[in-house]
Image (cartoon, grey):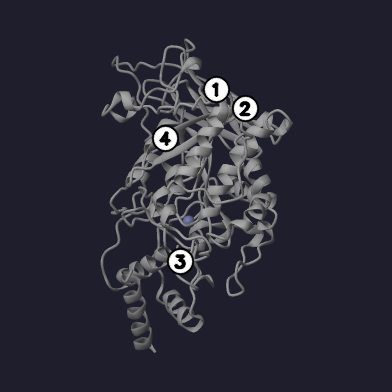
Amino acid sequence: MKSIVWILAVQLLARASSQGELPAPEDKPNEAKLMSRISVGNAPLEQRNYQVAPAPYNLAEQSEPYNIAFDYHNYDQMTRFLRATTSKYPSLTALYSIGKSVQGRDLWVMVVSASPYEHMIGKPDVKYVANMHGNEAVSRELMLHLIHHLVTNYHSDPYIRWLMDNTRIHIMPSMNPDGFEVAKEGACDGGQGRYNARGFDLNRNFPDYFKQNNKRTQPETDAVKEWVSKIQFVLSGSLHGGALVASYPFDNTPNSRKSISTLFKIVLLYYYTSCLCCKDCAGPQRCALSYASSPSLTPDDDVFKHLALTYSTNHAKMSRGVACRSSQKGFRRGITNGAEWYPLTGGMQDFNYVWYGCMEVTLEVSCCKYPPAHELPKYWEDNRMSLIKFLAEAHRGIHGFVMDEHGNPVEKASLKMKSRDVGFQSTKYGEFWRILMPGMYKLEVYADGYVPREVDVMVVDQHPTLVNVTLHAAKRKDGNFYRPQQQPPLYHRPSIKPQQPGFMSSITSGFNNLVNFFG
Ligand SMILES: [Zn+2]
């Protein structure tokens, strides 16, 4: 029997191997404007800022009815729609590009907010990133319809007005515009257009919390990394297709080695059912069946489950947990832990959470990746409420300011909730946010040169709790300023030893490659 497992494993391996923050820092923070990215050329990253794309001022265009068709929009059409939106709604939208794709297409982001050009002090920035797999096309169109829906309902829908008055919503309809251009309408599965123009999977291209990611970093990934380093996003949704589920961190796990018995089950399941489970299936007709992985839970698991459930329960179908295909399992209440579904290295959601304290959930919004355009109205109706309610969850938990004893903001103070060892930081205005469920917490605050503080906080369901923290400078007896002994919680890298090469690790790594290809 052992030899059969070995042969199957080798075959499996053989198959696997065949394949600025927007506001510029100015004297008056509330007057911070979007500055020119181009004008600063090759300045250091932290000095670069993004340029707002000017709204085309065209009287004829302004008088045209503002609409968005239920059709797919290629890059030029999408760009035209985004520009028309800023032209029509200049006080509610701002368009900027965070960089270029491999083939030189802009990575557009539309801010939709009552304060599109200015950071609103004390109000959270949130984001959606769609179409990072270029052939997962529904998400891209959902973003265009969301933009349209928000701006056209601002004056008539009190809830949308409240959301836009109190939140800056950044929407990136396509992180992989090159991939979309070569994807094919009607292709529910498969990988054509999934990757960027150099053949890289962008959702395997980020630094990883658990393992070293040796993939060459891509321009689209670099642009997003720079973006999230400049704007402290509180909440984020990464939209995909190929399944119907909200999947939350961690996507990776400290231990992806599988026992021989687990490997044995995987190999047998694969061959007896001729299918594999996948997150965003790239393989033709092989979307099925789960294999058993262990969950990899964050210290904020209660929050992530709540965020995922907010999306699934406001969706027309997701929370029913019905499988996309008869051969595939459904997800209980329409949510899953990412690693429990299957582990992956270099994903975007773990990066957002661990590096920048931004809570990101992966939203799989359609069983078919690129369905015929006439089905788009259904997808929009299914997802409309979820897309809006999810963003409103940024207004839960705590927010506040870290100040020194003179009332000056303390930038880059490290904060964390006691016993939740993934932290977050204060902005240059001393602001911070953390989404939390109702309960009692201790907030720990550290900053160089200050005495660390611990503050008791009560979180209620109805509104976020305002927590203002004053830090006192501390000098030691030797005249030097106090420096906290603890390592700041953010940017703390886990001490996980790399796997030793060997029989089991190469099998496991080969298996993971295979799964990664499908996902
Ligand atoms: Zn995807």
CB under 8 Å between callouts 1 and 2? yes
Near-viewer residue (317 or 491): 317
Circle 4 is placed at which residue position?
A: 97
Left or right: 141 in relation to 46: right
On screen, 25 above or below 348?
above
Mark 3 residue type: Gly
Left or right: 328 in relation to 493: right
Residue at 63 percent across and 49 percent down: it is 311
Circle 1 is placed at which residue position?
A: 120
Label 2 vs label 4, nearer the camera: 4
Q: Which one is earlier in the sequence, the residue at label 4 or at label 1? A: 4
Residue 376: x %, y % from top left: 62, 54
Circle 2 is placed at which residue position?
A: 166
Screen quadrant of the N terminus: bottom left
Q: Residues within 10 Å of mark 4 (few under 14, many from 20)?
A: some
Circle 3 is placed at which residue position?
A: 190
The number of numbered badges drawn on the structure is 4
Regarding mark 2 in the picture, which secondary structure is present there? helix
Residue at 70 percent across and 54 percent down: it is 316
Q: CA distance from mark 3 to mark 2?
A: 40 Å
Q: Which one is earlier in the sequence, the residue at label 3 or at label 2? A: 2
